[in-house]
Image: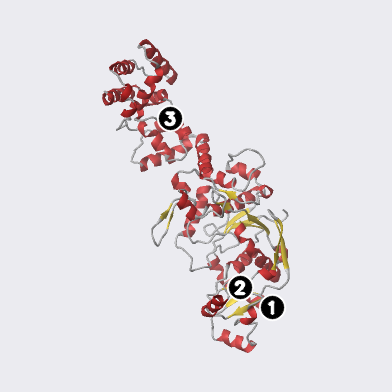
């Protein structure tokens, strides 16, 4: 750990932010903070064909919501900018030309039509050691013709020249030694016809320029590793190459393959951190935030997808995660995503979070449901009474709306078969004897004593009382509800309930 710890999250601004991307950002952030390092956001926008307006701002909003704000970013530049690859365009061509001059890369003038013709003949066509000498490039064309094509601004790409019969190895912080046979690696494009670098060249050049010490990315990038290792070597930067860690995939609930947006749509849960609106179609893809997840719970559940601290503890604050995080505890195996477990994390976080912290969000949920709240103190009391029953923040409305508006409908069917004039009389007397300031326990004892005096079992009267107060068979302790509603409102609701049941 001698050199400064500098890590980067480098998404492409192409749409919604998948929870796998957020987890990559989170693990980078935790590692940086654990070692007093710097967490960098670099926007990899070199593929202009896939660039989506608004996606960068959305990524920043997602990270801010999660509480994993970068130390350096396009919005917060440091000494290693610019932080958008498109703004670094002029720096990449020199490296491509250096690689060509040193014999590690070459110009390829093949047209899309020529490449498609090859693919039609060879279904698994790879541009590489076997095929490169059959193609139109600076390895097969005379030097004079190459010079002429360049002078005439003929479109070209620059490809890396992958060596034959070599093994490229590196130490992955999660997987140990990983080796690749270069005969199975094709000559990837490094510089595109528009002068923009591909991911392969840009990621190496930028990691070098930004002095990135550790590169954490998803397991799906493992096949690209030999190209990047060779580029570090060919550019003469081997000594400053970052340490690598390829994170396990987040899998579908059944474990068969990587979790995708399509899986979320099919199974009815989000895979994006926040709502994403497609600027072309206007289609909204639901996010965890808008579904009613707390950011603390979202971060907690992501951390546990592929990592644990070696104990049975499951609930961790961000500060605890920073303190306990270690690469050694990241699993090599993919982690199945379980939406029921995700909701469990949210439920646990709602339970342990103070009413004061929850209040602004809960108030907003009520406002969105058309319920105006003016009494902040009363709202805190309601939150404390019902939060143990809520899995999502939106549940506060369903579980607590009756505190702010008397029920318009009653589950009469649940009461009617066993209702009687004697029970109506019981409730009238109970309501008349309600006294201000009574505790829930005192109210319960009063209720039971009166029931006994009238020859009823308290149990058969509890359900009618609950339905009178809330409209249905739900909610916290019925006497807790009555205390919070107050004497006058409880009396009014009992009166209306009697009328509905008679």
Picture residue at 58% right of the left edge, 66% below the top: 199
List the residue tagged with mark 2: 126
The foreground one among 472 and 156 is 472
Location of residue 189 by image quarter:
bottom right
User: Residue 365's x, y, as percent?
Assistant: 40, 41
Q: Earlier in the sequence, mark 2 or mark 3?
A: 2
Q: What whole-number distance in Å separates the C-alpha atoms at marks 1 and 3? A: 73 Å
Q: What whole-number distance in Å separates the C-alpha atoms at marks 2 and 3? A: 66 Å
Depicted 422 relative to depicted 123: above or below: above
Depicted 280 relative to depicted 115: above or below: above
User: Residue 253's x, y, as percent?
Assistant: 54, 48
User: Residue 163's x, y, as percent?
Assistant: 70, 73
Residue 455 tag number: none
Q: Within 10 angstroms of label 3, few (less than 14), some, or many (20 or more) residues?
A: few
List the residue tagged with mark 3: 381
The foreground one among 395 and 485 is 395
Q: Earlier in the sequence, mark 1 or mark 3?
A: 1
Local secondary structure at mark 3: helix
The foreground one among 78 and 456 is 456
List the residue tagged with mark 1: 103
Q: Earlier in the sequence, mark 1 or mark 2?
A: 1
Q: Within 10 angstroms of label 2, few (less than 14), some, or many (20 or more) residues?
A: some
Local secondary structure at mark 1: loop
From the viewer's perspective, is the residue at label 2 or at label 3 nearer? Answer: 2
Picture residue at 51% right of the left edge, 45% below the top: 339
Asked if residue 235 shows in the view, the reply is no
Asked if residue 496 shows in the view, the reply is yes
Local secondary structure at mark 2: loop
Residue projecting furthest to the bottom: 144
């Amino acid at each position: 750990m001698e050199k400064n710890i500098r890590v980067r999250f480098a998404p492409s601004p192409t749409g919604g932010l998948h929870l796998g991307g957020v987890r990559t950002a989170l693990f980078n952030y935790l590692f940086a903070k654990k070692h007093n390092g710097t967490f960098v956001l670099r926007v990899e926008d070199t593929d202009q064909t896939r660039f989506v307006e608004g996606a960068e701002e959305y990524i920043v909003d997602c990270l801010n919501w999660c509480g994993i704000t970068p130390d350096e970013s396009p919005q917060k530049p440091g000494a290693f900018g610019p932080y958008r690859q498109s703004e670094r365009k002029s720096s990449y061509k020199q490296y491509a030309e250096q690689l060509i001059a040193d014999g590690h890369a070459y110009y390829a003038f093949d047209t899309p039509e020529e490449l498609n013709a090859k693919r039609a003949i060879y279904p698994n066509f790879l541009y590489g050691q076997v095929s490169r000498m059959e193609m139109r490039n600076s390895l097969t064309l005379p030097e004079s013709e190459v010079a002429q094509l360049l002078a005439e601004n003929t479109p070209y790409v620059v490809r890396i020249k992958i060596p034959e019969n070599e093994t490229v190895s590196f130490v992955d912080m999660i997987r140990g030694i990983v080796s690749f046979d270069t005969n199975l690696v094709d000559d990837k494009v490094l510089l595109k016809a528009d002068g923009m670098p591909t991911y392969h060249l840009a990621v190496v050049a930028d990691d070098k320029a930004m002095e990135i010490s550790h590169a954490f990315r998803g397991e799906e990038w493992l096949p690209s590793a030999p190209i990047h290792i060779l580029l570090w070597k060919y550019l003469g930067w081997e000594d400053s190459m970052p340490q690598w860690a390829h994170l396990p995939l987040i899998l579908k609930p059944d474990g068969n393959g990587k979790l995708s947006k399509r899986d979320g749509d099919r199974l009815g849960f989000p895979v994006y951190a926040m709502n994403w609106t497609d600027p072309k179609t206007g289609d909204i893809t639901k996010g965890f935030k808008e579904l009613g997840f707390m950011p603390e719970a979202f971060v907690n559940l992501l951390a546990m997808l592929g990592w644990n601290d070696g104990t049975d503890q499951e609930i961790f604050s961000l500060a605890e995660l920073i303190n306990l995080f270690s690469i050694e505890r990241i699993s090599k195996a993919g982690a199945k995503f379980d939406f029921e477990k995700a909701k469990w994390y949210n439920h646990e976080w709602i339970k342990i979070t103070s009413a004061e912290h929850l209040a602004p969000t809960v108030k907003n949920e009520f406002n969105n449901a058309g319920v105006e709240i003016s009494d902040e103190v009363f709202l805190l009391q309601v939150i404390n009474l019902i939060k143990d029953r809520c899995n999502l923040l939106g549940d506060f409305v369903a579980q607590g709306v009756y505190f702010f508006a008397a029920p318009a409908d009653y589950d009469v069917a649940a009461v009617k078969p066993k209702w009687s004039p004697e029970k109506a009389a019981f409730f009238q007397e109970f309501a008349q004897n309600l006294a201000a300031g009574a505790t829930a326990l005192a109210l319960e004892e009063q209720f039971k004593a009166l029931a006994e005096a009238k020859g009823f079992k308290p149990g058969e009267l509890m359900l009618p009382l609950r339905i009178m107060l809330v409209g249905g068979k739900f909610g916290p302790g019925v006497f807790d509800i009555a205390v919070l509603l107050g004497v006058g409102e409880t009396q009014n609701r009992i009166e209306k309930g009697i009328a509905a049941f008679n």
